[in-house]
Amino acid sequence: MLIEKPKSFICPEFIVRQAHRAWEVAGSNQLRHDTFVKEQGIFANHDRDEIDTDMIPIVAVSTLASEEDEVVGTVRIHQPEVGVWWGSRLSVAPKYRRVGKLGPELIRFAVGTAITHGCNLFLAHVQLRNVPLFRKLNWKELESLEIHGQTHMKMEANLSAFDSVHDPKRGWITLNNKRAA
């Protein structure tokens, strides 16, 4: 018997972890495409670049009856030089943006995973509308710059405010603390 989700259903918990299954990677890629190509129009055809060949994708996966359901959030991290890590392409599916704390959880997990891999400095180019969120998570502003036709803020994470992630592929569960509208 197939159980259908009600149209207003928002799952009670999410798993945040390093994407390591094909469907998770595909879901991350699709969410990035939907956000940065279709919704925001930052890229014409796709948002893939050279970073994608050597990055770690991180996903937030919704659950249905305690079973993994779909990728509803993503971010990627990479290390261009020893000890220096960058986060980019943070995205949460539209219907999950005001539910719980997926953006902050993805950021915490990204920084914590980099710390586990020897991070001494974690940076990101953050869209201006997201700067207040990053400030709340102990990031500081470094400089404003134009990237892909949009103003971004280069920001640095205060690593002492983040815990390392001991098993990135296993991840952690975060509970939804808000009700659907």
Image (spheres, rainbow, N blue to C red):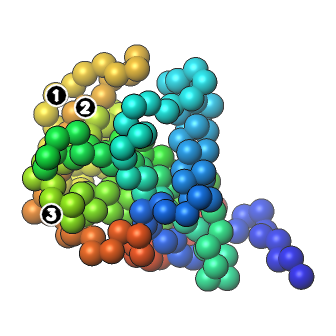
18 relative to 126, above or below: below
* Residue that appears at 50% across and 24% down: 42
* Residue that appears at 44% across and 67% down: 16
Pointer 3: what residue? 161
Sequence-earlier tag: 1 or 2: 1
Pointer 2: what residue? 153
Confirm whether residue 122 shows in the render.
yes
Left or right placement of residue 127 versus residue 176 in this view = left
**Residue 84 in the image, given as x and y percentages of width and height:** 16, 45
Sequence-earlier tag: 1 or 3: 1
Q: Disc 3 marks which amino acid?
A: Ala
60 relative to 151, above or below: below
User: Residue 11 shows which numbered tag?
Assistant: none
* Residue that appears at 15% across and 63% down: 161
Kindly check if marks 1 and 2 are in contact, taking CB atoms under 8 A apart as contact. yes
**Residue 141 in the image, given as x and y percentages of width and height:** 16, 37
Q: What distance separates the C-alpha of mark 1 from that of mark 3?
A: 21 Å
18 relative to 51, above or below: below
**Residue 181 in the image, given as x and y percentages of width and height:** 63, 61
Pointer 1: what residue? 143
